[in-house]
Amino acid sequence: SQQGEEDPQALSIQEGENATMNCSYKTSINNLQWYRQNSGRGLVHLILIRSNEREKHSGRLRVTLDTSKKSSSLLITASRAADTASYFCAKETSGSRLTFGEGTQLTVNP
Amino acid sequence: DTAVSQTPKYLVTQMGNDKSIKCEQNLGHDTMYWYKQDSKKFLKIMFSYNNKELIINETVPNRFSPKSPDKAHLNLHINSLELGDSAVYFCASTKGGIADTQYFGPGTRLTVL
């Protein structure tokens, strides 16, 4: 199964700190996407990184991809209380399959 | 305007009943999806339609039947509801295929009693 493993499952930090979430996978991917889900809401796309890319930035978000280690990380810098949410990685593999990980619940304390 | 909308937001029903969830997207996207998110937040794709044609049909009970009257709508009908069907169901759409950015609806929380 390509179900991704994300760690940590839960992360609690103070406002202003950085938050790092990791996502690993087992087989080759075409791209990997990160999504955020606020409580009671649908998922919102954050960043897409292709298999031939190593790093992408968007505002306070930085995503890295290490295909040799089959892992990706999402870094949120200078976190805010509004960043409190669940964060999911989604792997797109050949055969047009998109598999979501189990998510990391991030809590940013004011 | 809401890009991807679902109705109803909440659905509480008895075992054995039949229910439908509706989804509409006004993004002009070609592909729509249904996902199921369980109590542990694990999100799994159920179906995908491209321009009204079924292209992904994951292993789900045949009590679940998607219907796409046009490319802006993808409805989900569930027959003979079971306790294990309780979950949050999300509709999503992409401009092209599954590799594109998914735009999710707000979800429908289904509770089967």
Image (spheres, grey):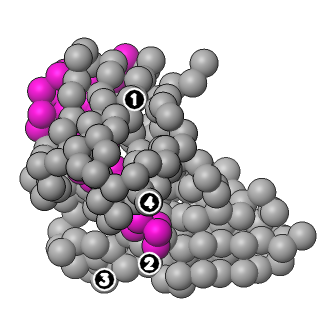
Front position among marks 4 and 2: 4
Point out residue A51 in the picture as x, y percentages from the top left corner. 28, 60
What amino acid is found at the position of numbered circle 2 in the picture?
Answer: Glu
Question: Which quarter of the rendering shows the C terminus of chain B?
Answer: bottom left
Q: Residue at x 14, y 44 (%)?
A: B56
Prevalent SS, magenta region: strand
Left or right of A59, for residue A55: left
Reading the image, the residue beneath label 1 is B23
Q: Nearer the viewer, residue B39 or B2?
A: B39
Give the structural element (helix, strand or loop) at label 3: loop
Q: Is residue B29 magenta?
A: yes
Check disc 1 and give the amino acid type: Cys
Q: Which residue is mark 4?
A: B113
Rounded to the nearest angstrom, the CA distance separating label 3 from label 2 is 14 Å
Residue topped by disc 2: A6
Q: Magenta segment range?
A: B28-55
A45 and B85: which is toward the camera: B85
Q: CA distance from mark 3 to mark 4?
A: 45 Å
